[in-house]
Image (cartoon, rainbow, N blue to C red):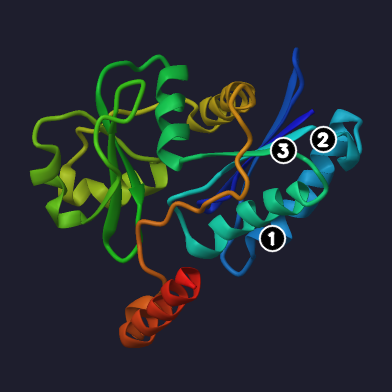
Amino acid sequence: MLLGLDTTTERLHLALVAPARAWTRALRVEPGQSHSTVLLPALQALLTEAGIVPSALTGCITCVGPGGFTSLRTGVATAEGLALTGVPVWGFSAFELRARALRVGGLSGPSWILLDGQRTEAFAQKWDGEALTPATKHPSAELPTLLGSDLWWAPAAFRAKLEPVLGSSGTMLEDEENVTLQALVELCREKTGLPPENPLVPFYLRETDAEMNFPHASAHLSEALRRGHAR
């Protein structure tokens, strides 16, 4: 049984995937809650629904970002914890999951995937079955120049924040939650055909608060680590 995780936003996506069946669940992390306290009970409930125990898991596929720093680490840490017990793990990007959701929802052709970068910023990457551009971070005010007349899509919660800048011209998905869960199931089945990843590498497009607020200390630490690896 494969476990699929996406903890990169305020909405958790979980999947247990067998060869011929899948169990899925999406939950919102409310303000004041932590992703870790929501994830573990939800995962236990899904395992119970599927009638299996954690030891029956044969692989874990998790979103490695970009996303919220703490929420992203929750999913990666969960996968890495399973890896310590011998369970193989794989990663996928938040862009890849949403691009697959667009395909599951019947939308085709090149389109920008826009994800909430917080602080009036957006994470952006153009997809058409595969990534067409590098993933980048932009102030939301720069998006009209970046996108031009190209099609774009953003999760419903973030779309509302973008409409003052981009208008209502973006592509929409019907039943966004369910197509995202279907996309997660598809990625679980596909990723296990690739070599496992160990360790998983989180995909960050923004500096941590420490790097932003204490740049000199961050630079000193990076140099110290570099020298340590060179020895």
Crowding at dot 1, Cα within 10 Å, few <14 / some 14-19 / many 20+, comes out as some
Give the camera-side residue of 28 and 211.
211
Q: Where is residue 135 in the image (x, y as percent from the top left)?
A: 30, 44
Quarter of the figure with residue 220: bottom left
Give the camera-side residue of 158 and 136.
136
Quarter of the figure with residue 33: bottom right
- Residue 177 lies, with reference to residue 142, above or below; the image says above
The CA span between labels 1 and 2 is 19 Å
Which residue in the protein does label 3 denote? 88
Mark 1 or 2 closer to N-term?
Answer: 1
In the rendering, which numbered label is found on residue 36?
1
Q: What's the residue at 62%, 28% (across, down)?
A: 188
Q: Position of residue 45 (x, y in %)?
A: 83, 42
The CA span between labels 3 and 2 is 10 Å
- Residue 177 lies, with reference to residue 219, above or below; the image says above
Amino acid tagged 2:
Leu
Answer left or right for 38 relative to 76: right
Amino acid tagged 3:
Pro
Give the camera-side residue of 57 and 68.
57
Tell me the element at label 2: loop
Mark 3 or 1 closer to N-term?
Answer: 1
Tell me the element at label 1: helix
Amino acid tagged 1:
Ser
Numbered label tally:
3
Task: Tell me the mark number nearer the camera, choosing from 3 and 2.
Answer: 3
Answer left or right for 224 relative to 55: left
In the rendering, which numbered label is found on residue 57?
2
- Residue 60 lies, with reference to residue 116, above or below; the image says above
